[in-house]
Structure formats: C-alpha cells, structure tokens
Amino acid sequence: MEFTAGARLEVRITPDDVGKRVSVRTETGAGEGAARFTDTLGILTSWTDGVLTLTRRSGETASLAESALVAGKVVPPAPARRRGVPAASVAELTRVSTRAWPAPETERVGDWLLRAAGGWTRRANSAVRLGPADPELDRVVAWYAARGLPPLVQVATGGGDGDERLVAALDARGWRPVGFAVLRVGALAPLADREPDGRVTVGRELTGRWLAGSPSAGRDPAVARRVLAAGPSVLLAEVAGGAGEPPLAVGRCVVDGRWAGFGAIDVAPAHRRRGLGTALMAELARAALAEGASAGWLQVTPENTAAGALYERLGFAEHHRYHYRAAPSD
C-alpha cells in the first residue's frame, strides 16, 4: 500500500505536478455500501478537464476522476539501483540495444529510427527513439504502410527518463499497447566467475546448425540470419546435440563498448533445468570480459517468470520496461 493505514489522507498534488512520480488513492464503488479504495503509482502525465492520467512502470495508463481523489502525494524517484548493478540511463540502453539488433532497412525520421525486417520480431520492425523529440506519427504510419508492415513505436517506462508522457499521448490517440518486455542489467564478472563449462563453445560464425537451435529464427531464417549476424561484435554460443541433431541450447551476445547484450538464449524443452542456460551466459560473459566489456543487459517478457527468476539469480536487476504501441487499424 502506498498510504499507511491510519495516516492522515490529503490530496497534496496539483496540475503543476504533471511529469512527476506520484501516488494517488481513489474511491471506487461509491454508493454500493462500504467504500473501496484503489492506490495507483506512476508518472502523472496529464491533468485535464477533471481527469488525471498516470502511466505506470509497466507502461499501462490509468485515467482517474479528480472527483474520486481521496489522497495524493509526490513520491521520490524509483529506489536507487542495487549495489553492484551497472548504472545507465534509459537513453543509453536504448541506443545500445538498438545497435545490437540491427534491422536490414532503416531510416532516420526526426529523432526516431524507423526499422524494417520483413516483420521478423517487433524489435526489428518498429520506430525507436534516438533523440528528445516525439515521433512524427503520420510519417511513421506512411513509412510502414509502404512496406506492408503494421506501424509500431517502441516506448520505455519506469527508468527515470522514459516515455511516460508519450505513452499517455499515444494512448489518447488510440495507439494500443502490445509486446511488453523488461530490460535487466547486471555485472559480467560475477556471472563469469565459475569454472569453464566444456559443454559450451563460443564462436563468431552464424551457422545453419546454430539457427536450427533457435525456434524464433526458424520463422524466417533468411531475415533472422541478416539480423543476428550483424552488430558491433557478435558472439555466438551453443551446446552441441548428437550427430546430425540441432544444438541442445544456443545463445547470442553483442559486445558494444562496456556493454554486452545477451539475447536469443534458447534451450531445447527436453534439456531444460540442467543449467545449460546459465552455462551459455557464463561462457558468453567470459568472452565479453575478454573484449573489454564489464556490464550486461538482456530483455525478457514479464510473463516468462522462469527466465526472469534465472536472470535475477544471475545478478540481473530490472532497469526499466518497454513495450510497443500499434497504430489504430481504422
């Protein structure tokens, strides 16, 4: 609960607090017997015509009637990063992650990079922020329509310098949310501080065998090869299967300055819970350290709780969240 039981409840926010992180309590179920209350925490993105809009860390928006306010206060920024977790801004990680997943076709439009890869993965088929200005939505829609792709805009939330106001504006214009993800960061040295695992081989060539171990790549191998083989410094790891069989597990890491981005970590279902995912990441971390990287990042969907728990154990803490906004279909 954001408001301690028994504490005096006051509305201590005004429209001047738009842009700040706030916690509000609203009364719900009025006239239905005992009053019920709902607490909402997020960035106050608008306060217009008696309606407050908050954008939560998850990227979801909440519209609250001013008349239902029971309490409200400005709260400090999200808790400081955990000890040992690399420091970074949302903007820095957005740039690094964009370079790590390069689309075959791109165009800079204002402060946004438009990316297309034949529809393979939202990351390679969406507009991503490179500067402070908001996207030119009409140009974004036209660019993707010319390629037969749905217009998507990637937005970040919950990191201190995210897109909460843009999220609220897109929400108001009917751009619906899709594809939620969590970006986590962690130090490489603790991950690599274990005995080398002989099951894992690390190389640079994106082979057909490696692609056979990646279910997502199998949806469009030609485009996947173009995306996965590109990047500042690409490392590819695998755990071999039997003769003529696909790998038991594969993983990819892109080294970019101090950062090492882990992705496409896939373990065959029959071979999970054997430590193969941890082994892949540890060996990739060892190789990335040798190239001068010190910090790692990765992305995982919120619903993949097993992977999220693994990454937490490996020292990767949540930095921020992001999702995509899809243009109205009509």
Image: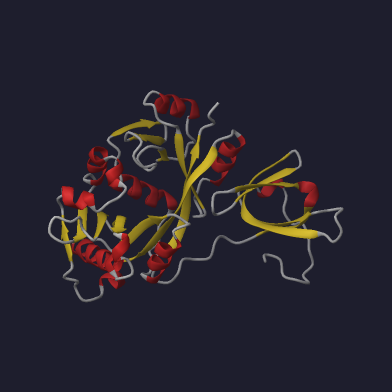
Q: Residue furthest left?
A: 243
Tell me the quarter of the picture where residue 235 sits: bottom left
Q: Indicate the position of residue 38 as horizontal and vertical percent values.
A: 72, 58
**Looking at this view, is 322 or 32 the one in front?**
32
Give the residue displayed 44% in from the left and 54% down from the top.
301
Q: Look at the picture and state if 213 lies above or below 103.
A: below
Q: Is residue 278 left or right of residue 305?
A: left
Image coordinates of residue 138 in percent, x first then y, are: 49, 25
Q: Nearer the viewer, residue 234 or 267?
A: 267
The outermost residue toward the bottom is 195
Q: Residue at x 47, y 33 (%)?
A: 135
Residue 83 image offset from top left, x and y in percent: 42, 72
What residue is drawn where x is 12% and y is 59%?
A: 243
Say whether residue 146 is left or right of residue 291.
Answer: right
Of the 4 image quadrants, the one containing the N terminus is bottom right
- Residue 245 to residue 208: above or below: below
Q: Quadrant of the C terminus?
A: top right
Whether residue 233 is visible to the viewer of this picture, yes or no, is no
**What residue sits 38% from the left and 61% below the top?**
185
Picture quadrant of residue 9: bottom right
In the shown orientation, is residue 206 left or right of residue 41? left
Q: How many marks?
A: 0
Between 124 and 212, the one lying in front of the other is: 212
